[in-house]
């Protein structure tokens, strides 16, 4: 019975993870370590929620300090807890580049000094924004991920919520002041707003190890013979007594197990 490890998935592929009791689509946006700015822990499969999750303020006040932001805490507590337990266990603890503190400094902590996290927002550089294609207030807290193109307003940056394109937050501070953080506008253009603004959306990112298959750490075949086509892999989720069938083409669904 054939199966495909996440490390063999092409950039741009869709995989499904069980989140808040339902299967949710994630995009493979990068494979491996993007640059030397990243700790070795970032050598994995980068996954980005395809559609935005919800609207939420970046910080409880207008302070562009991501490490101590409301959104960083929320992603690594409330959002992380909504993944199934087996998925939580296989999400990597990584160290990502970030600008420490608030203000206008462009000094970035990287490598082993990066921010330790499991669920995070992408940075301005990771989605393809640079000082040359946006402005000098872009923070160099990362390197472009393979899924994204360099440039302002490219279509792959556009994300939706309930079918409509929306603005979504990045983790990067706007270096023009101490109150604003960068975001992607609904047309893909770079923009920034006060960190306490509640109308922009979250698009969580995470990393998994390349050898993982689907949503289970230890896949166990539950069918024999030819009752399922060879381009499907199958495994059992004990907690919910459900069978999850994941196509190589990343089409997934759940079928309740008959007792």
Image (cartoon, rainbow, N blue to C red):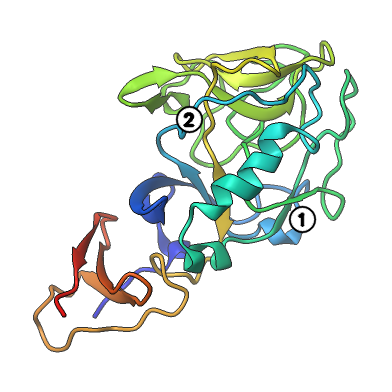
The one of 122 and 222 positioned closer to us in this rendering: 222
The one of 92 and 153 positioned closer to us in this rendering: 92
Answer with the quarter of the image where residue 230 lies. bottom left
Name the residue at 57% across, 61% down: 91
Q: Looking at the image, is 20 positioned above or below residue 151?
A: below
Q: Looking at the image, is 217 positioned above or below residue 104?
A: below
Name the residue at 41% across, 65% down: 215
- Do the residues bearing badges 1 and 2 touch, measured as CB atoms within 8 Å? no
Report the side of 54 relative to 251 (left or right): right
The picture places residue 256, in percent across and down from the top left corner, at 19, 67
The picture places residue 218, in percent across and down from the top left corner, at 44, 80
The picture places residue 93, in percent across and down from the top left corner, at 68, 59
Element carrying mark 2: loop
How many other residues sit within 10 Å of disc 2, few (<14), some (14-19) or many (≥20)?
A: few
Name the residue at 49% across, 43% down: 48
Q: Quadrant of the C terminus?
A: bottom left
Which residue matches tag 1?
A: 39
Element carrying mark 1: loop
**Mark pair 1, 2: CA separation:** 29 Å
Answer with the quarter of the image where residue 135 lies. top right
Asked whether the viewer can see residue 28, the reply is yes
User: Mark 2 or mark 1, which is nearer the start of the sequence?
Assistant: 1
User: Residue 54's mark?
Assistant: 2
Q: Quadrant of the N terminus?
A: bottom left
* Extreme residue in the bottom direction: 224
Report the side of 237 relative to 122 (left or right): left
User: Residue 17's mark?
Assistant: none
The one of 161 and 190 positioned closer to us in this rendering: 161
């Amino acid at each position: 019975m054939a199966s495909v490890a996440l490390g063999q998935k092409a950039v741009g592929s869709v995989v499904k993870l069980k989140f808040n009791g339902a299967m949710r689509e994630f995009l493979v946006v990068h494979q491996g370590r993007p640059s030397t700015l990243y700790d070795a822990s970032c050598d994995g499969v980068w996954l980005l929620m395809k559609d935005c999750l919800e609207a939420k303020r970046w910080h409880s006040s207008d302070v562009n300090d991501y490490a101590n932001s409301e959104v960083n805490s929320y992603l690594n507590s409330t959002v992380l807890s909504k993944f199934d337990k087996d998925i939580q266990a296989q999400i990597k603890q990584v160290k990502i580049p970030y600008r420490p503190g608030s203000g206008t400094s462009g000094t970035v902590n990287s490598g082993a000094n990066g921010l330790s996290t499991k669920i995070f927002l992408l940075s301005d550089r990771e989605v393809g924004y640079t000082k040359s294609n946006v402005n000098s207030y872009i923070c160099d807290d990362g390197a472009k991920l393979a899924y994204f193109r360099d440039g302002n307003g490219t279509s792959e940056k556009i994300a939706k919520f309930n079918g409509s394109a929306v603005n979504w937050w990045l983790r990067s501070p706007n270096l023009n002041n101490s109150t604003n953080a960068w975001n992607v506008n609904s047309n893909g253009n770079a923009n920034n707003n006060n960190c306490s603004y509640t109308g922009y959306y979250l698009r969580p990112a995470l990393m998994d190890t390349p050898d993982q298959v689907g949503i289970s750490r230890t896949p166990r075949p539950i069918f024999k013979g030819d009752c399922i086509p060879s381009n499907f892999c199958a495994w059992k989720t004990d907690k919910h007594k459900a069978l999850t069938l994941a196509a190589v083409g990343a089409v997934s669904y759940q079928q309740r197990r008959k007792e």
